[in-house]
Image (tube, rainbow, N blue to C red):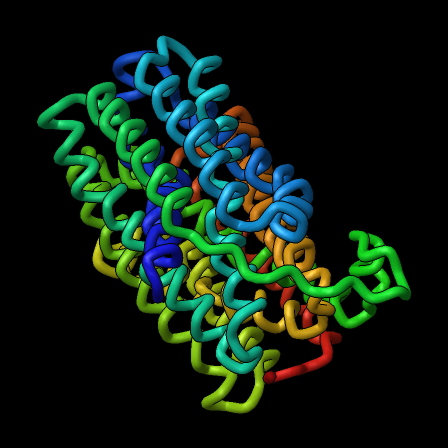
Amino acid sequence: MNAGLVSLVVAYVLSQFYRAFLAVLAPVLMDDIGAGSDVLSIASGLWFIAFAAMQIPVGWALDHIGPRWTASTLLGVGGAGGALVFSVAQGPTAIYVAMILIGIGCSPVLMASYYIFARVHAPAVFGTLAGMVIGIGSLGNLASSVPLAMAVEGLGWRASLGILAAVTLLVSVVVAASVKDPERPEIPTTGRGTLLDLLRIPALWPILPMMMVNYAPAAALRGLWVGPYLSDVYGYDAVGIGQVTLAMGIAMIAGNFAYGPMDRIFGTRKWVILFGNLLAAAGLLALWLAPDGDIWRTTLLIASVGFFGASFPLIMAHGRSFVPVHLTGRGVTLLNLFGIGGVGLMQFFSGRLHGSLLDAGKSATESYGYVFLGLGLILLAGCAMYLFSRDRAV
């Protein structure tokens, strides 16, 4: 972990923060500018859609320009600029624009570190390194829970976002100064080295659906639904919401570190991933069965979804193992496109489902229960398709 990789990990901490901070801000945004759960579900979805849409150009840039300028430029312009726009928002439109900009800014930072790992380190340790980065980066999840709630109470949400804009700009400068680009590989004479070459690899096809759904439920809960759910069903304020999201954030960190070396311990990636995601689906179905149960049970189930839903780095390692070296940048970003794009689609889907249930006369508790059911069923569908994948542990 040299200075460049450390700076990318710090940038990824910010990325994790920005994808999750709306849950804690939900009550104050509703009070100050009338941004309810419908607005925040769209805003959160736009972050993920913008992030996903950038993966194809980011993949090209990693292969042709390198991780240094790709990550630093987008983070400085998009990430810092978006946070600044958010800090002066007066209504939903500005929040939408801010979240799109922040999504663009955060889009290259994780893939920049994965590109370096894939180009410099042995394939067998990719999963462990990938899990380590997400595990450390998930400190952003913790920062967007109790610490953010305290900052909002002490400074106000506008000042807090202004400070975040300055911090994001500073990190982008450090990335530009410290990251070293790996040497570029030779491109083989056969094939043009395009995205279509990746899609011609049949082994990737059943992995992509699993990538699309594995992270989506945990991200939807942590980044969007935990806040409104705890507020509407349990009457929690920002501090109470922050405590539950802190528990989920810790579970997500632990899950990333736990998944990382599992392929080497058990000699399989496929079955570790499949079993873990089935347990995450079980947690969602348990929340559906008792959405207004004991708060300790609810917190434990929410944390279990975060822990067992942290298989992203191992799925990334599984898919990357089938990608040729000259397509490393586009390979990891294609996988990330499905992973983050799935989250964005899930935000829109869950928001529409929740709104339609309320319009149909369902109570808030029932509506959230069916959101949990929908997330669980989609995860189970991804597991069913992943059954047809080909295992590769190195």
Q: Residue 237: where, in percent of width, then height?
A: 19, 33
Q: Quadrant of residue 249?
A: bottom left
Residue occupying the far right of the picture: 190
Q: Quadrant of residue 390?
A: bottom right
Relative placement, left or right, of 287 versus 207 is: left
Residue at 38% from the left image edge and 28% from the top image edge:
80
Q: Nearer the viewer, residue 79 or 87?
A: 79
Relative placement, left or right, of 390 versus 364 is: right
Q: Residue 175: where, in percent of width, then height?
A: 39, 45
> In this orientation, does residue 153 appear?
yes
In the rendered view, tell whether residue 105 sits above or below residue 98.
below
Q: Residue 252: where, in percent of width, then height?
A: 35, 61
Q: Nearer the viewer, residue 23 or 371?
A: 23
Q: Residue 162: where, in percent of width, then height?
A: 26, 22
Residue at 59% from the left image edge and 56% from the top image edge:
213
Quarter of the N terminus within the rendering: bottom left
Tell how many labels: 0
In the rendered view, tell whether residue 272 sits above or below residue 108.
below
Residue at 47% from the left image edge and 29% from the top image edge:
78
Relative placement, left or right, of 245 versus 346 is: left
Q: Nearer the viewer, residue 173 or 101?
A: 173
Residue at 60% from the left image edge and 83% from the top image edge:
394
Relative placement, left or right, of 40 versus 165 is: right
Residue occupying the far top of the picture: 90
> In this orientation, does residue 137 appear?
no
